[in-house]
Image (tube, rainbow, N blue to C red):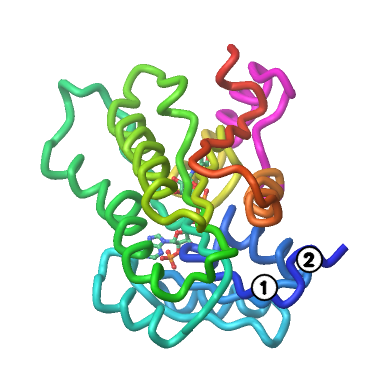
Amino acid sequence: METLKNKKVVIIGGTSGIGLATAKLATLKGANIIIASSNQQRVDNALQELPNESKGYAVDATNESQLKILFEKIGSFDHLIFTAGEGLILENIADASLETAQKFFNVRYWGAFTAVKYAIPYIRTTGSITLTSGIASERPNKGWTLSASICAAMEGFTRALAMELAPIRVNIVSPGMVKTALWSAMPDIDRQAMYTNVGNALLVKRVGEAADVAKTFIYLMEQDFGTGQTLIVDGGTSLI
Ligand SMILES: NC(=O)c1ccc[n+]([C@@H]2O[C@H](COP(=O)([O-])OP(=O)(O)OC[C@H]3O[C@@H](n4cnc5c(N)ncnc54)[C@H](OP(=O)(O)O)[C@@H]3O)[C@@H](O)[C@H]2O)c1
């Protein structure tokens, strides 16, 4: 069913992983897609995987003026999704460099903050914003202080936005481990071993695929009544 027929959906971080999977699924539901990320080549590659009418722009989510110009160019639209992010350093707080740790807020937190700020005048009142957290806030492990802090900040930001921007609905998706390019810095053999070990420990006996999480983003655009919520999709991570 084309539940998003003729809806204009903007996905910052839509060139890879969860964002690209959401873009693909949204087009099957009838949406018109606009993707953005910082690397032109990745934008071009992603557009090859989407219908011809889809649009893509190279925009760095840490660059305020690029985001402002992006939304001026796009004009009115229905749904904003923010999935931009990079692999984080996982380390104990005693070993953390404060300067490096602070920089990791730039894309995921400040990027989302800036994107929402400049998107607001253009989002239809029947539309929605869906942001990205992670299970680190709910169920942290040792070495996850940075990741947990960013995710918790994003979830509080989401609730505050839901109050401030109503009737626009604002929600956030919190995935567990998902097989995407986010983990590509790890050697292949270590990454596969991590997926297997983490997957075996999960209630669903596997780590997530980008398409699993994409379904959650689609649901949050389709539904009309929930706002200010964190929707966890983690294979049961938060229960073990
Ligand atoms: N994969 C997981 O296990 C997992 C678990 C929990 C939460 N998450 C969160 O889910 C979100 C999506 O991650 P993913 O797994 O789909 O990773 P991914 O495949 O690496 O995708 C990340 C996307 O963010 C874009 N991006 C990175 N820096 C950017 C910047 N400065 N400006 C604009 N776009 C930027 C990337 O494109 P460019 O490189 O072209 O900029 C890419 O499109 C992230 O916030 C991640 O932290 C992931």
View extreme (top): residue: 240
The reply to whether the residue tagged 2 has its Cβ within 8 angstroms of ligand 1 is no
Q: Residue 215 in the image: state x and y as whole percent.
A: 71, 49
Q: Earlier in the sequence, mark 1 or mark 2?
A: 1
Q: 214 or 17: nearer the eye?
A: 214
234 falls in the magenta region:
no
State whether residue 140 is above or below residue 191.
above
| Residue at mark 2 | 29
| Amino acid type for the residue under numbered disc 2 | Lys
Total label count? 2
| 3D distance between C-alphas at marks 1 and 2 | 9 Å
Residue 5, by quadrant, is: bottom right
- As helix, strand or loop, the secondary structure at mark 1 comes to loop
Specify the principal SS of the magenta part. Answer: helix
Residue 122, by quadrant, is: bottom left
The reply to whether the residue tagged 1 has its Cβ within 8 angstroms of ligand 1 is no
- Quadrant into which the C terminus falls: top right
Dot 1 alpha-carbon crowd within 10 angstroms: few under 14, some 14 to 19, many 20 or more:
many
- The residue that appears at 73% across and 70% down in the rendered structure is 27
Could you tell whether 205 is left or right of 114 in the image? right
| Amino acid type for the residue under numbered disc 1 | Lys
Q: Residue 4 in the image: state x and y as whole percent.
A: 74, 67
- The residue that appears at 46% across and 81% down in the rendered structure is 57
Residue bounds of the magenta highlight? 192-211
Could you tell whether 58 is left or right of 177 in the image? left
Q: Which mark is residue 7?
A: 1
210 falls in the magenta region:
yes
- Quadrant into which the N terminus falls: bottom right
State whether residue 54 is above or below residue 173.
below
Q: Which mark is residue 34?
A: none
